Amino acid sequence: MARITLDDLAHSYLPDPKRDEDYALRPLNLEWADGEAYALLGPSGCGKSTLLNIISGLLRPSRGRILFDGQDVTDAPTAERNIAQVFQFPVVYDTMTVRENLAFPLKNRGRDRAYVASRVAAVAEMIGMEAELDRRAQGLTADAKQKISLGRGMVREDVNALLFDEPLTVIDPHMKWRLRTQLKSLHHEFRHTMIYVTHDQTEALTFADKVVVMHAGQVVQIGTPQELFERPAHTFVGYFIGSPGMNLIPARVEGATAHLDGGATPLARGYGAPSGRVEIGVRPEFARLSATEGLPVRIDRVEDVGRHRIVRATLEGTPISIVMPEGPPIGADMTRVVFDPAHVNVYRDDWRLEGEAA
Ligand SMILES: Nc1ncnc2c1ncn2[C@@H]1O[C@H](COP(=O)(O)OP(=O)(O)OP(=O)(O)O)[C@@H](O)[C@H]1O
């Protein structure tokens, strides 16, 4: 396994990029630790595949270098990078059996029969295809074929990294959960460096130790699922992760107080007097309704989603959400919202301010 370093890396599909928007991948420095499982998360078009293809060698970056364990591989072709890649759609050899498909990467490298047989058996169990090993791949469902692709990606133990590009798209929901769990336990067992591309936050948060969030060609945060939830570094992370996403409310911040038109709300840290476009960000889980304290809100509707209720409300013209536990109907006197100061983040021009202990 390898540590992967991106050194002042950037990519544009245009010949003469000038503005930020000309880059599919804006300049970045990033280190992927050896043996760590990462998810690369972001909406369609944010640059995930571009980044993955640069790591695998399918694409040469227009700027910067890529290193495996400190060795420059920027100009090395895919075959020399010793990585396994699983794509969104299955890549299998129809005329071969499932067993032959799984064995292919090992046979190609001249591994002996006993080793090949034991690896194929282990991988077949992992993907739940022990009973189908002698079937031809032709005629299998897309779902089964994708499981073979995943198995083939995982059969080699000596790769530098395992790259997955939305690999569970064609898999049915139940199997999706099972494969994701297996990928995670496989990672704990073998400690491969894994990069898993997805636009699905559930998939990213359940699979990865660290999630790399991308937005408009830029890595906006790298963090554990808990860090992304509690301290989103960029307003996009707050909005994209969580359901519903983080509330963002324009405010004027002074010291440890955020002033809104309808009143003030205390903050747990001090921020001086930040200029620029200042907003406070509060997860719906850290807001509650009150009859007596907090800021005046108008309740627009209440959605019962099973385990809790989501209150949709308006605070000074800004739509906000509040997560409430199941319980009696919300009284007409609940006309105020209170934010938990320990969980109010402050943003200037979309980036989170650290603040100082108040
Ligand atoms: N071969 C190409 N030529 C020109 N522009 C491209 C090419 N491939 C991607 N782009 C553009 O680069 C940007 C990033 O695309 P990329 O495919 O990396 O995003 P993504 O996050 O992987 O999206 P998706 O999940 O839809 O694949 C997009 O604006 C896309 O239109």
Image (cartoon, rainbow, N blue to C red):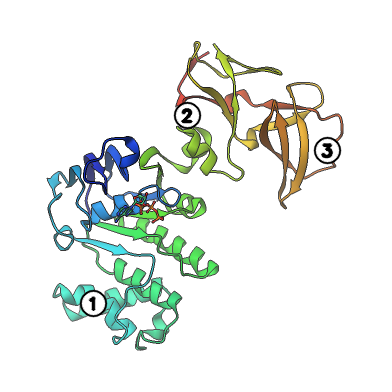
Query: Does mark 2's beta carbon lie closer than 8 Å to ligand 1?
Result: no
The residue under label 2 is which amino acid type? Asp
Disc number lying in front (3 or 1):
3
The residue under label 3 is which amino acid type? Ile
The residue under label 1 is which amino acid type? Phe
Query: Of label 3 and label 2, which has the lower sequence position?
Result: 3
Which residue was labeled with disc 3? 330
Viewer-nearest residue: 149 or 208: 149
Determine if residue 344 is in view.
Answer: no
State the image coordinates of residue 326 (x, y, percent, origin top left). 77, 45
Viewer-nearest residue: 140 or 357: 140
Which residue was labeled with disc 2? 350
State the image coordinates of residue 254 (x, y, percent, origin top left). 56, 11
Which residue was labeled with disc 1? 104
Question: How far is the residue under mark 2 from the one under mark 1?
Answer: 48 Å
Residue 242 is tagged as none
- The secondary structure type at the circle numbered 1 is helix
How many residues crowd mark 3 within 10 Å: few (<14), some (14–19), many (20+)?
Answer: some
Quarter of image, res 334: top right
